[in-house]
Amino acid sequence: MAILELHDVKKNFGDKQVLKGLTFEVPEGSIFGFVGENSAGKTTTMKMILGLETIDSGQILIDGKRVHYGNSLINRMVGYLPDVPKYYGYMTPKEYLTLCGQLTGISKNDLSDRIEKMLKIVDLPINKHRIHGFSRGMKQRLGIAQALLNHPKLLICDEPTSALDPIGRSEFLNLLTSLKGETTIVFSTHILTDVERISDYVGILHDGVLKANDSLDNLKTQYAKSQIIFEFISEDTAEKAAQILGKNSHNNQKQVILNYTGDYQIIAETVLNTLLQSHLIPISMNRQKTNLEDIFMEVTA
Ligand SMILES: Nc1ncnc2c1ncn2[C@@H]1O[C@H](COP(=O)(O)OP(=O)(O)OP(=O)(O)O)[C@@H](O)[C@H]1O
């Protein structure tokens, strides 16, 4: 079942049409990576999901309930982590989360247990250290604890790893992955390898619409490059193979790259038979892999 649905959502700022009819669904329990170039409209979309931005036309539903601008009832189902969360630095994490819990109406009895559980999940110690001494990674983890305090069905993270170094980023992505089962996650980013690493589904926003929206595996199959790379024992063998395969030149050194159209299985069998008949045995043969960056470039070209 979809926890989040957008139906033909449109948004203008003045004359500029930012979203031209955005439609997609996010299945419950999944991690959805939301990508698009600068100014594509990712933050605007997230703010509309959070009820912090008006929708010109179309509908957004969370758990089947329609989002309206400023509707705090729906907001309670959603946790939000901005790219650089702001804190009262003089507070300890426990004091800060207590304040957040009180503001959102969590009962005093439940709050203490919930805070301890959340700090454990995000791997922050319960001690007297104040937030102003925290690294960016620690602040981001505290942001997750805050966003999850109220048991949200949906967690929205806007470029959550952009300010983190590679180690902080890796730890943070592990944390997001570990939240599977706890909530559904929608996160935006420019770091496509992050999306590849943790997302179940990917949406690519371009020119005001979602140009691609599927599981990463399906996108890779759909946008797979039709290329096979053969490697031979010597340059000489590679040169001979290139000639037999009807290619005038081979790739530098010992590789031959074959572009093909049609079914991989049939092409691969034919080419291998041709090479075998000439006693040209490749030492490796690889179907060219497609990564999210290739897909992104093709979709947004
Ligand atoms: N309140 C606003 N008033 C006018 N224009 C706005 C407003 N908010 C956003 N925009 C414009 O809408 C477009 C989309 O902005 P948005 O911040 O949603 O993009 P984004 O995909 O999140 O970009 P980035 O990756 O750079 O953060 C941009 O051209 C931006 O200037």
Image (cartoon, rainbow, N blue to C red):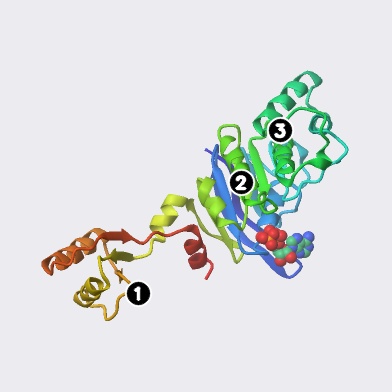
Image depth: mark 1 or mark 3 in front: 1
User: In the figure, residue 247 lies in which quadrant?
Assistant: bottom left
Question: Ligand 1: does it lie within 8 Å of the C-beta at label 3?
Answer: no
Q: Position of residue 177 (x, y in %)?
A: 56, 39
Q: Secondary structure at mark 2?
A: strand
Position of residue 100 measured from the top left corner of the image (x, y, whole percent)? 81, 33
Q: Ligand 1: give its quadrant.
A: bottom right
Q: Earlier in the sequence, mark 1 or mark 3?
A: 3
Quickly name the residue at label 1: 252
Q: Judge whether residue 124 can be spotted in this image.
A: yes
The quadrant in which residue 185 appears is top right
Q: Which residue is mark 2?
A: 186
Above or below, comparing residue 34 to residue 78 in the picture: below
Residue 124 tag number: 3
181 vs 230, left or right, is: right
Name the mark nearer the viewer: 2 or 3: 3
Separation of marks 2 and 1 at Cα, in angstroms: 43 Å
